[in-house]
Amino acid sequence: MLDKVLLMAFVVVVIFSIHFIANLFFKRLIMGKVSKRKETIFLLIINLIKYGGLLVGLFIILSILGVDTASVLAGAGLLGILLGFGLQKLMQDMINGFFIIFENQYVVGEYVSINNNVGQVLELGLKTTKILTYNGEIHYFANGDITSVINYSRNDSLSIIDLPILHKYLVDEIIELVESVIKDFNHHNIISRPKVLGVQVIDETFYSIRIVCPTKSFQHFEVTRVLKTKIVKMLNEEGIEYPSPILLKKQ
């Protein structure tokens, strides 16, 4: 009996050693500054090693305890139990995780929207994806439950502002005022200068002027806030009234 206990303890030590070595190897890869895609793939391989080690260790321990693992695996009883404990869902998550990684939908560090939750990818594993939102919340998604993905980090972004103006103000005069503000606009996250496209919406009581500005990837939120601040200051200085919130709801 003591020999079995010592042997099982040895198996547990080996399993934890595999986990430790895998984590150490991954940290060294990060220190080597590999690309985010390679980092994600390496993390996938390390997770496979971890899960594989746990599975092999479990069967070894069962064998030490005298369980005939071959006959148990062949029996439908254990398969039914495993399915009952969520093996089917686990396989669905892992398969979807493979597709996410090898289709390169997103990698660690990118800004994405997953099921309408926006944040930065902290971790992409076989079973789950973990993202960090702006307000500091960490969201965990089972890969099999991910139905929609928007990746904001692959291409340049666009800051879009629709400025509502009452009809009593002439379009040409408002556009001239706006252009006087944006012509010297500079920000470290913009790619090119803002541009007034013209009238976007025409309502019974107001119209809106669209201003756009190309920005670096996922930096359009910050640029939009800064640009709006400058435009609002100009409107206040010129004494231009805003449409009421009730009217704006029609837009």
Image (cartoon, rainbow, N blue to C red):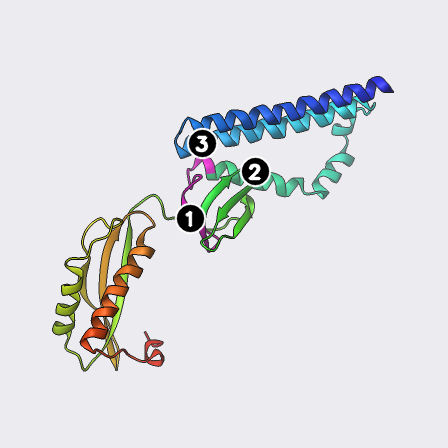
Q: Amino acid at mark 1?
A: Val
Looking at marks 2 and 3 on the same chain, the residue that comes earlier in the sequence is marked by 3
Mark 1 lies on a secondary structure that is strand
Query: According to the image, label 2 marks what residue?
Result: 94
Residue at image point 60% right, 38% down: 91
Residue 161 drawn at (x, y percent): 27, 64
Horizontal side, residue 212 vs residue 183: left or right: right
Please identify the quarter of the rendering in which residue 10 is found.
top right
Q: Which stretch did the figure color magenta?
A: 101-119
Query: According to the image, label 3 marks what residue?
Result: 39
Horizontal side, residue 236 vs residue 45: left or right: left
Residue at image point 46% right, 36% down: 101
Residue at image point 18% right, 82% down: 168
- Quote the CA–CA distance across marks 2 and 3: 18 Å
Looking at the rendered image, the quarter that the N terminus falls into is top right
Residue 212 drawn at (x, y percent): 23, 59
- Quote the CA–CA distance across marks 1 and 2: 20 Å
Q: How many marks?
A: 3
Is 113 covered by the magenta stretch? yes
Q: Residues within 10 Å of mark 2 (few under 14, many from 20)?
A: some
What label does residue 112 carry, if any? 1
Q: Are marks 1 and 3 in contact (CB under 8 Å)?
A: no
Residue 112 drawn at (x, y percent): 42, 48
